[in-house]
Image (spheres, grey):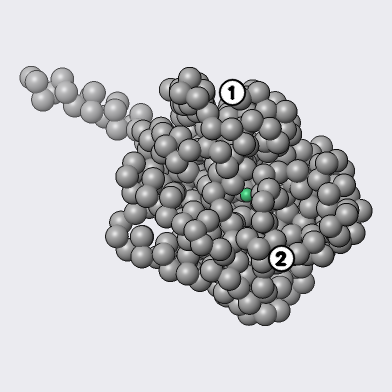
Amino acid sequence: MIARSFKPHLIAMLSASLLVLFSIMFAGTGNATADLYDVVVLNGRVMDPESNLDAVRNVGIRSGKIQTITTKSLKGRMVIDARGLVVAPGFIDLHVHDMNDEHHRAQAMDGVTTALELEIGAADIDQWYAEREGKTLINYGASIGHVPVRMVVMKDPGTFVPSGDAARRPATEDEIAEIKRRVELGLKRGAIAVGFGINYTAAASHREIIEMFRLASKYQASCHVHMRYAGLKEPMNCISAFEEVLAAAAMTGAPLQVVHITSMAFDDTPRVLEMIREARSRGIDVTTECYPYTAGMTRLDSAIFDGDWRGQLGIDYKDLQWVATGERLTAESFARYRKEGGMVALHSMKPELVRSAIADPLTMIASDGILKDGKGHPRAAGTYSRMLGYYVRETKTLTLMDALRKMTLMPAQRLERRAPIMKAKGRLRPGADADLTIFDAERVIDKATYTEPGKYSEGIKFVLVNGVAVVKDGQLQLDAKPGHAVRAPIQ
Ligand SMILES: [Zn+2]
């Protein structure tokens, strides 16, 4: 009885399942839209530094994500013919300043899909992200910055970096408590790191810095540090400056990223790289970055030019270039412009040292760029194409895959513990964000110079940000605003 009454149910269930199966099959074969991607990138040389894939493939993108990487043919609403071009993960810049549309456009033309202000950072994280939401060409994110927070708390009149109390006066106990409170608030509100410019806040005590590292450790945030001293003269040199932050990282457990190592260590760069390698071999999480240029840039009215800067940096007035006019400085013009305030380029790094730092497997590439009203350092617009054109193709300093790794996977990995969103960036694999840079490896080159720093790079053909083209056939797509926030979870 039981079996007989069960049988018709079974048949009914089977036929229902068959019906569902048939309808799925028909949807798959009969309805073309099911196989239609939003964007397909066809026949490009797909290079992924995570899997080491380096082969001709087709990439299918839907809803802002990579869906498939395959040798099979694909159909899409938008078709990019990438024959003869390299298809790479979009470049991730860990170190930019003063982001604006002009800067973002130049970076997109240089292949950058994510630009992060991690060294100086922001004082108010909610405000910083709110100002950019839905308005940007490329992805954006910021650290909570010890420098700007100290400037707010100590009422410093400086712009960007301090020129008053925040540079030159030790903080009181109450002020340190208030700086800590604001840095922790920033971390709770999703800042992706903690930024430091100890050289710019030279009166900040070692203890004040350690307090900030403790907070960073509590939130698993990396500390992106412009160290206390640049240059060569003991005892205030880059070696002791590195010892300070290395000790803070070892003590507190906070991950440490030493920024622009070549412009801090100059001739000592190989020695500091060796110290980083040794510290890593003992399990300390310390990493570093550099930019592919032989001149640095900063504000002439900053604390860096207090005291014996010529002896300390091993340069003279003639090695300084006033950005506003392009002129080299003298003692007289140095004094005049320092009062006025503004940006200055420091021609201070030997080409062979920059080259060896770029070739070292430890370094990531980050621009440290600033670009506004056509003024700035060429690294803002040219860093990534200069890596691909000058350092990979022309001087064969490193392989293309190694260069891509330093510009994509390594920066993503640096941040992914704190900001899991970065696990979907810096790689080409199904499920990753569709941030792609497609370029002509035979032609790509930087065009920005110290006198024309805003000039766009050449040879970057297509750039996709979350699946939307921001560069198409080498042309900027000015109306596109596909940039998303890169932010840690809010607590
Ligand atoms: Zn810096």
Dots 1 and 2: beta carbons under 8 Å? no
Image coordinates for residue 185, horizontal then vertical, percent: 49, 23
| First in residue order: circle 1 vs circle 2 | 1
- Between residue 59 and residue 379, name the one nearer to us: 379
The residue lying at 67 percent from left, 80 percent from top is: 395
The residue lying at 80 percent from left, 61 percent from top is: 317
The residue lying at 58 percent from left, 29 percent from top is: 150
Secondary structure at badge 1 equals: helix
Residue 409 visible to the viewer = no
Rendered-image quadrant of the N terminus: top left
Image coordinates for residue 193, horizontal then vertical, percent: 50, 39
Rendered-image quadrant of the C terminus: top left
Task: Tell me if 5 is positioned left or right of 356 in this view.
Answer: left
Q: Which amino acid lies under the numbered mark 2 shown in the image of this protein?
A: Ile
Which numbered disc, 1 or 2, marks the residue closer to the eye? 2
Task: Please say if 433 is above or below 71.
Answer: above
Task: Tell me if 18 is positioned left or right of 30 in this view.
Answer: left
Image coordinates for residue 446, horizontal then vertical, percent: 77, 64
Task: Please say if 317 is above or below 75.
Answer: below
Q: Which amino acid lies under the numbered mark 1 shown in the image of this protein?
A: Val
Q: Which residue is mark 2?
A: 315
**Could you give the CA–CA distance between mark 1 and mark 2, rounded to whole angstroms?**
34 Å
Residue 170 visible to the viewer = yes
Q: Which residue is mark 1?
A: 153
